[in-house]
Amino acid sequence: MATSHADALTAARDRVAQLESDLDIAVKRDRHGELQERAAEPGLWDDPEHARQVTTQLSRVEAELARYDALVDRLEDLEVLDELAVEEDDAASAAEVVAGLEVVRAELDRLEVATMLGGEYDREDAIVSIHAGEGGVDAMDWAQMLQKMYLRWAERRGYETDVYDRSYGEEAGLKSTSFEVRGPDAYGWLTVEHGVHRLVRISPFDSQARRQTSFALVDVVPVLPELDNEVEIPDEEIRVDVYRSSGPGGQSVNTTDSAVRITHLPTGTVVSCQNEKSQHQNKAVALRVLKAKLAELERQKRAEELDELRGGVQNVGFGSQIRSYVLAPYQMAKDLRSEYETGNVHDVLDGDLDPFMEAELRRRVREASERET
């Protein structure tokens, strides 16, 4: 006789009910209605920037509701299937219920982790900067591998990305790069990636095929819509340099000096952009990135965390890494904070980062709970 899975389905239903509360689904439905009305206003696109903000918020709320509703629908289908399996003594249907429950539990796990993204800026887009550290040309190649990893991760999630700047190494790889990731909770997810990442492998640049350890720093800051008004930068505090955009090996990729580098003199913060077609556009993007970085510095000052100021690469080496990726003599990726590890390093480097991110978010929640008790 086919076995009923009513107890397991009830447990899943209880988790869904708790999730509905934790995710403020009712509030999101009201918000969705408001945004739909604003998006339908005749003069919306008279202000393109405002229109973009409204449509972006609408698409994000729609995505969150669609994901929750799909989970509820799947659970309801499984409940009906379970009843039929018992009534008709259908072992195949009962097996389908078991498989479906595993999918539902996995999705519940993912959505429950999303409730941990309750930081002030977790909902915002993110600017990611990667700087090669110790390891010479291998470190530069590692920086480029990390950029590919995060861009693939973003692609898997359906996030949009814009690469603003690449500073190529003389032989291979990237000295540094910066790019924006746009999507629901982008900063909340990516902020756990901030820190030094270590790669161990047989160097493809060593004629003797020796093992090489390389380091790169990943820096993440949120993008806030109100930054233009929040952060004012006097002209005398910045130095603007223009130069010709370059590609791998120092090759020029255009014939005009359109790339822009801005240095904030009081803090030494440097940002650059060579992605846009004109010098004016590159300067506007670079200023936007600079404001995001300065806003982050100011928040850290208010939190008395000056010892963790972001953006520097002078200590990117042994003793400061958050995660190791080993390709030789064995294969393993391990986070040194959550201690989560996997042997599927190539999948990780192809953007399969969610398990690492979820493990670190859970660790942070446990740590915060322990401090409160």
Image (cartoon, rainbow, N blue to C red):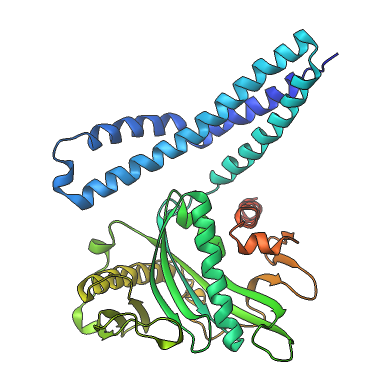
Quarter of the image holding residue 141? bottom right
In the rendered image, is residue 122 in sight?
A: yes
Q: Which of the pair 93/182 is nearer the observer? A: 93
Q: Is residue 225 above or below residue 244?
A: above
Q: Position of residue 223 (x, y in %)?
A: 36, 60
Q: Residue at x 64, y 57 (%)?
A: 356
Outermost residue, right side:
1
Q: Is residue 183 left or right of residue 149?
A: left
Q: Is residue 222 left or right of residue 48?
A: right
Q: Which of the pair 40/151 is nearer the observer? A: 151
Q: Position of residue 292 (x, y in %)?
A: 35, 67
Q: Residue at x 34, y 40 (%)?
A: 58
Q: Is residue 249 left or right of residue 279?
A: right
Outermost residue, top side:
87
Quadrant of the image for the N terminus? top right
Count of labels shown?
0
In the rendered image, is residue 316 in sight?
A: no
Q: Residue at x 66, y 39 (%)?
A: 106
Q: Position of residue 246 (x, y in %)?
A: 37, 83
Q: Position of residue 215 (x, y in %)?
A: 61, 79
Q: Is residue 180 above or below residue 216?
A: above
Q: Residue at x 50, y 37 (%)?
A: 23
Q: Is residue 239 left or right of residue 216?
A: left
